[in-house]
Image (cartoon, rainbow, N blue to C red):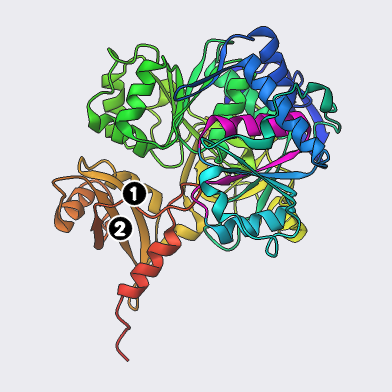
């Protein structure tokens, strides 16, 4: 079969190998351990800025020294290579240094979002068996007690009130043994969002990371020592960690940290820090457009604007192109289990292929399958199964779930989609989010994307409302801006653009954002609960 996706565009340097019991297309030239990227960046760009966080500016020489000192301090505390180390923090330079330190010391980092509550952190620390926790000082009072986390021996606070024992003034390089273990060794345990049931720890290896980093560098044509990214999404998301921090380390670029996303402040950083690259969710671009400061005159350096996590409305794409005609707007689709990108949409297709999440990246094997795992013909709708060297080997301490989810060597994504004859992938919905209205299948993502095109809509989420007659009806939760539309206006807007059975019959309009979990995903379970609570019991 002829190659599709980016492999057909850029086929150089690929080979076939066996890893994790799978036969995979791999990059022949790749780092065996991603920790080597930081040292290489410090060698070729020692004085170049590695991290910018407000008034703190770290060169690659500085960052490497901090990473060495932190790693040496953890080794002095008795931590061994392979031990898990939690990092519970918001976006800040100390967290980025903590990631670098875990890589350098051979520890397995467990990123924990700063919006997580104590019980959630308790579960993840226990499940991972973390022996140490690097914690932002403002969160230190919420660290679970020793009784709840018996494996946790060291809590190491960092932040504005002081960096403590992790930043010893002595040079720590001599105290850090070189990392051991091959490229299949674990680098991170990243917990999935847990929108259904308990979060699962995806086991991310150096092998996975190396391929995702190369995918980003090649598809985005990132230039060495010249790129500057604005990190506005949490570093604890797979996107922030891989697409931005580690990919910028690989090309000796600069990570500009924004601690909390605010649209006007983000625009100031994009301008003042001469940012060339960023990855955001569509709602962030929408909010920046509403401030009025997003234009080519003020952002001459911004070259790549990637997005993912939700569809980008056509009107928003067109407005971004109008204001920033030189920006390469690239849709990305992936997950924690695929170590970030599985597909990327070339910038030239942003409008022409706006319903697509892109082409499979160089080493990806993506199929639309029926319920029995059989491949479907091009254009047929089925579950997307994703294979490739960026797909994690499984879930931590969950062998049965791993076998069920990765049993044929590819990851069962749970996403419903299709792949056309040219290889373009379209994601229609999560399997659990599909609505069955009297036998008609309604894909919530399609309706959400349509509603987001209304000028007064900030974001939308569509769920099923139980119905004793039709089984399910379509209900929309809509976050609106000033001058909010009415239910009738939104229904009319949708009815003019999609089939009548897809049009929401009821709405919940609100000015506050939709509920999200610690990984930034809309919590549809909470929305479904609200709908159930508001739905009257059928007459008996």
Q: Residue 380: where, in percent of width, then height? A: 51, 46
Give the residue number, with chain letter if any, for mark 2: 476
Please tell me which residue lies in front, 102 or 15.
Answer: 102
Tell me if residue 510 comes above or below residue 300 in the rendering.
Answer: below
Q: Residue 112: where, in percent of width, then height? A: 59, 46
Write the start and end of the magenta stretch as one range.
91-116
Looking at the image, residue 146 sits to the left or right of residue 180; the answer is left
Looking at the image, residue 259 sits to the left or right of residue 538; the answer is right
Q: Residue 197: where, in percent of width, then height? A: 58, 63
Q: Quadrant of residue 452?
A: top left
Please tell me which residue lies in front, 124 or 212.
Answer: 124
Give the residue number, with chain letter if any, for mark 1: 448
Image quarter hosting the N terminus: top right
Please tell me which residue lies in front, 385 or 69.
Answer: 69
Q: Residue at x 71, y 31 (%)?
A: 70
Please tell me which residue lies in front, 240 or 89.
Answer: 89
């Amino acid at each position: 079969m002829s190659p599709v996706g980016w492999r057909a565009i850029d086929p150089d340097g690929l080979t076939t190998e066996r890893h994790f019991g799978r036969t995979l297309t791999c990059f022949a030239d790749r780092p065996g351990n991603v920790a080597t990227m930081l040292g290489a960046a410090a060698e070729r760009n020692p004085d170049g800025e590695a991290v910018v966080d407000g008034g703190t500016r770290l060169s690659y020489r500085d960052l490497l020294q901090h990473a060495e000192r932190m790693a040496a301090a953890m080794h002095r505390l008795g931590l061994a290579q392979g031990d898990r180390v939690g990092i519970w923090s918001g976006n800040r330079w100390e967290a980025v240094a903590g990631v670098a330190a875990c890589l350098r010391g051979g520890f397995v980092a467990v990123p924990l979002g700063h919006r997580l509550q104590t019980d959630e952190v308790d579960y993840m620390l226990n499940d991972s068996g973390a022996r140490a926790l690097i914690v932002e000082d403002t969160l230190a009072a919420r660290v679970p007690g020793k009784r709840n986390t018996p494996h946790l021996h060291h809590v190491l606070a960092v932040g504005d009130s002081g960096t403590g024992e992790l930043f010893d003034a002595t040079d720590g390089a001599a105290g850090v043994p070189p990392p051991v273990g091959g490229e299949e060794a674990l680098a991170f345990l990243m917990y999935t969002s847990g929108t259904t049931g308990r979060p699962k720890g995806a086991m991310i290896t150096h092998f996975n990371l190396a391929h995702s980093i190369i995918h980003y560098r090649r598809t985005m044509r990132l230039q060495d020592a010249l790129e500057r990214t604005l990190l506005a999404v949490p570093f604890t998301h797979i996107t922030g960690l891989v697409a931005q921090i580690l990919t910028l380390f690989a090309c000796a670029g600069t990570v500009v940290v924004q601690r909390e996303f605010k649209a006007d402040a983000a625009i100031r950083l994009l301008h003042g820090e001469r940012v060339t690259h960023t990855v955001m969710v569509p709602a962030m671009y929408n909010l920046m457009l509403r401030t009025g400061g997003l234009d080519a005159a003020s952002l001459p350096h911004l070259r790549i604007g990637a997005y993912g996590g939700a569809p980008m409305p056509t009107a928003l794409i067109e407005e971004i192109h109008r204001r920033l005609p030189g920006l390469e707007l690239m849709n990305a689709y992936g997950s924690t289990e695929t170590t970030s990108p599985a597909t990327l949409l070339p910038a030239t297709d942003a409008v022409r292929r706006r319903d697509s999440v892109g082409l499979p990246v160089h080493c990806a094997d993506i199929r639309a399958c029926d319920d029995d795992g059989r491949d479907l013909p091009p254009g047929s709708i089925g579950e997307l199964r994703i294979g490739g060297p960026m797909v994690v080997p499984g879930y931590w301490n969950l062998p049965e779930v791993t076998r069920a989810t990765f049993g044929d060597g590819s990851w069962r994504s749970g996403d419903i989609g299709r792949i056309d004859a040219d290889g373009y992938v379209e994601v229609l919905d999560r399997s659990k989010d599909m609505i069955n209205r009297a036998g008609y299948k309604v894909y919530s993502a399609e309706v959400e994307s349509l509603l987001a095109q209304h000028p007064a809509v900030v974001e939308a989420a569509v769920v099923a409302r139980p119905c004793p007659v039709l089984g399910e009806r379509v209900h929309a939760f809509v976050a609106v801006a000033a001058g909010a539309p009415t239910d009738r206006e939104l229904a009319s807007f949708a009815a003019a653009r999609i089939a009548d059975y897809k049009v929401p019959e009821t709405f919940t309009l609100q000015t506050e954002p939709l509920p999200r979990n610690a990984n930034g995903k809309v919590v549809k379970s909470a929305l479904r609960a609200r709908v159930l609570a508001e739905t009257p019991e059928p007459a008996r």
